Amino acid sequence: MRRASLLVLLALACSTRTATDTTASAALPPIEPPTGTAVSRIEALLYDRIGLDPTTVGSTLVERAVHRRMSALGITSSAGYLAALGVDSQ
């Protein structure tokens, strides 16, 4: 599966905001890369919502896509992103 396809799937499966949202302002602190636990929870969410088997694309690609999505939404932490998705960060 191509990287762009995964980004689209992540956006469709996990987006809690509309397409009209603006990207993060330059004043935001640096974005914390998603942790292994956060990536695992997001992979489970992708599997539950759209049937995406994370082994077909790999955790690294999911992590990169999540990081890009966090940046686009202005979310700076994995816990914040999981909260936006409605997933418990614990």
Image (tube, rainbow, N blue to C red):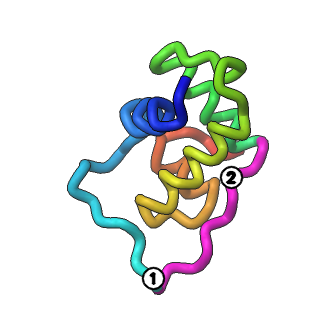
Task: Give the quadrant of residue 38.
Answer: top right
In the rendered image, residue 51 lying in the magenta stretch gets the answer: no
Give the camera-side residue of 30 and 85. 30
Q: Is residue 47 above or below residue 84?
A: above
Give the camera-side residue of 7 and 48. 7
Residue with the most extreme left position? 20
Give me the residue at 63% from left, 16% from top. Answer: 53
Give me the residue at 66% from left, 44% from top. Answer: 63
Give the camera-side residue of 76 and 68. 68
Give me the residue at 71% from left, 20% from top. Answer: 55
Task: Give the quadrant of residue 29.
Answer: bottom right
Label 1 is placed on what type of residue?
Ala
Q: State the image coordinates of residue 48 (x, y, percent, origin top left).
A: 53, 18
Quarter the C terminus occupies: top right
- Crowdedness of circle 2 by 10 Å Cα count: few (<14), some, many (20+)? many
Q: State the image coordinates of residue 79 (x, y, percent, origin top left).
A: 62, 54
Q: State the image coordinates of residue 24 (x, y, percent, origin top left).
A: 41, 71
Q: Is residue 61 above or below residue 19?
A: above
- For disc 1, the marked residue is 26
Quarter the N terminus occupies: top right
> Comparing marks 2 and 1, which lies closer to the viewer?
1
Mark-to-mark CA distance, 2 and 1:
20 Å
Label 2 is placed on what type of residue?
Pro
- Crowdedness of circle 1 by 10 Å Cα count: few (<14), some, many (20+)? few
Secondary structure, mark 2, is loop
- For disc 2, the marked residue is 34
Q: Is residue 12 left or right of residue 33?
A: left
Most prominent secondary structure in the magenta stretch?
A: loop
* Highlighted magenta segment, given as a residue range: 27-36
Residue with the most extreme bottom position? 27
